[in-house]
Image (cartoon, grey):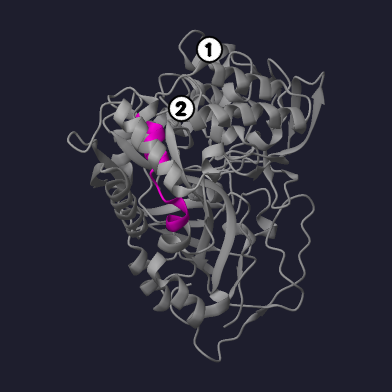
Amino acid sequence: MKGKCRAGVASLLAMSVIASSANAAVVPEGTALAPTQELVRNNGSEPATLDPHKVESDVEFNIINDTFDGLVAVRKDGTIEPRLAERWENKADNVWVFHLRPGITWSDGEPITAEDVVWSWRRLVSPDIGSPYASYLGNMHIVNAAEIAEGKQSPDTLGVKALDDQTVEITLTQPTAAFLNMLAHPTLVPIDKTAVERFGDRWTRPEHFVSSGAYRVTEWKVNERIVGERNKRYWDDAHTVINKVTWLAVTSQTADVNRYKAGEIDITYTIPLNQYAQLKKTLGGEVHTEPQLATYYYEFNTTKAPFNDPRVRRALNMGLDKDVIAEKVLGQGQRPAWVVSQPEIGGITVKNPDYAAWPREKRLSEAKRLLSEAGFTEAHPLTFRLLYNTLESHQRIAIAASSMWKKNLGVVATLQNQEWKTMLDTMHTGNFDVVRYAWIADYDDASTFLNNFRTGNSENTAKYSNPAYDEALVNAAKAPDSAQRGHYYQQAEDILSEDVPAIPVYHYVRSQLVKPYVGGFSPNAMGLFSTKDLWITAH
């Protein structure tokens, strides 16, 4: 909410709300609500687009999560929550049938049908769209999804069909343990075929925007804000309290905090590293820090010399003092990372490579030896460009990393920064040496991280390829239990530890400032929260 409420304004008394099947704003009985239910949340950057089939980051997912519903969602406790689908059944392990809620409609009042799901998923996987998540349905092992993404089959052969207006059937090539968790991803929300075909790329503009979620976009001022108004046709609107949400595109973390202090922002995108300790002292309970299934890494262009040499990549991995980055440069509870996924994820534990436990001097000695073997010496040092997207924390980490490589190995890393959308384009066109990236889990399973390095995956911007690695992931997907799945994930991580297509730097926590009058704030393990689950108390 912008500004402070004037003293003496009457407040509303909330009734106790019990959600039947979905997460919702469950306001404690007796809570006094503010008369104006509006929320301002900083979203960190200008979104590349709001087309769910053309996005790949939390900047876009945060808004899509508020404006669209998928068939299911995942609750904070990891259980599956019905959304557009009210129920489902699994037949013969590899066939799933989902039954849509009766009477659900788009924000313009037109019915949402099973055919909308089929059309949307065919569009997602079609090579014509070029979605960063084109490989996702193939990773779910949906029939013909991988072949369609590779241009070997027509989109209409996808193993998803409408049995009738309210029934979707999905056929897999094999049982997939993480299937329901994967189904909750924001790229799998159905979108309105009529709007897309009528307006093309302009369908996401406010005047054409048609949504299925709790909010609909009514204003978009580029590089400033996007505004969402409550969608009164949303199937669960009765359990929504916030009437208006504004997502800001404030890239400066300092400005984010300053505007929060001025009462212009209710929830910040993050907290500047150099202000965290002081804000903890002065604002106390308004500082929210939660573990997050996310890994920060430096990705190599493995097709470009000298980074087509795994010795060079492994040497740079060993040459970083990750404890210092996690504990001193960051200092919010982040953990140094030696695996790409997570030490604990989806009921399994992943072990670090042996060299992670070596004394620092032994690691540095081995790193120098590897660089020397690859032809880089004090007289002929390795030089490259380290690219990061514009944000104070990324700059601070890049400065620390380049300093460590220079001091420890004699390597010269020249820093280069670009705006978020530009950097994504640079990554996908392969015009980089080493780039800062991070992956926030799409679901609670190691494959959400590891699939990004599978040969031909649409998110494999490192262009890494190793048949043994691919085979380990195939075997993990087929594994009948978590113990066997963990065995194959460990194999995959061990291969990455030797080949190092990306240097894992640290495992995340998510730190945000949240006004004390915002009720219901409780992000999930991926750091995602829904505006419809929140409310503003009288203040």
Q: Would you place residue 444 above or below residue 262 in this image?
A: above
Q: Which residues are magenta?
A: 312-325
> On the image, numbered disc 2 is attached to which residue?
499
The residue sitting at 30% across, 26% down in the picture is 374
Q: Residue at x 61, y 43 (%)?
A: 69
Choose between 503 and 26: the one closer to the eye: 503
Q: Is residue 125 shown above or below 53? A: above
| Residue 238 relative to residue 362: left or right | right
Q: Quadrant of the C terminus?
A: bottom right
Query: Which residue is disc 1 drawn over?
Result: 147
Is disc 1 surrounded by few (<14), some (14 to 19) or many (20+) residues within 10 Å? some
Residue visible at 48% across and 37% down? Answer: 52
Q: What is the spatial separation of the Cα atoms under label 1 and label 2, in whole angstroms?
A: 27 Å
- Is residue 3 depicted above or below 357 in this figure? below
| 314 falls in the magenta region | yes
Q: Name the mark on residue 306.
A: none
- Magenta residues, dominant SS class: helix
Q: Residue 457: x and y, percent?
A: 48, 23
N-terminal-most mark, 1 or 2: 1
> Which of the two residues, 503 or 212, is positioned nearer the viewer here?
503
Q: Where is residue 187? Give x, y as percent.
A: 53, 35
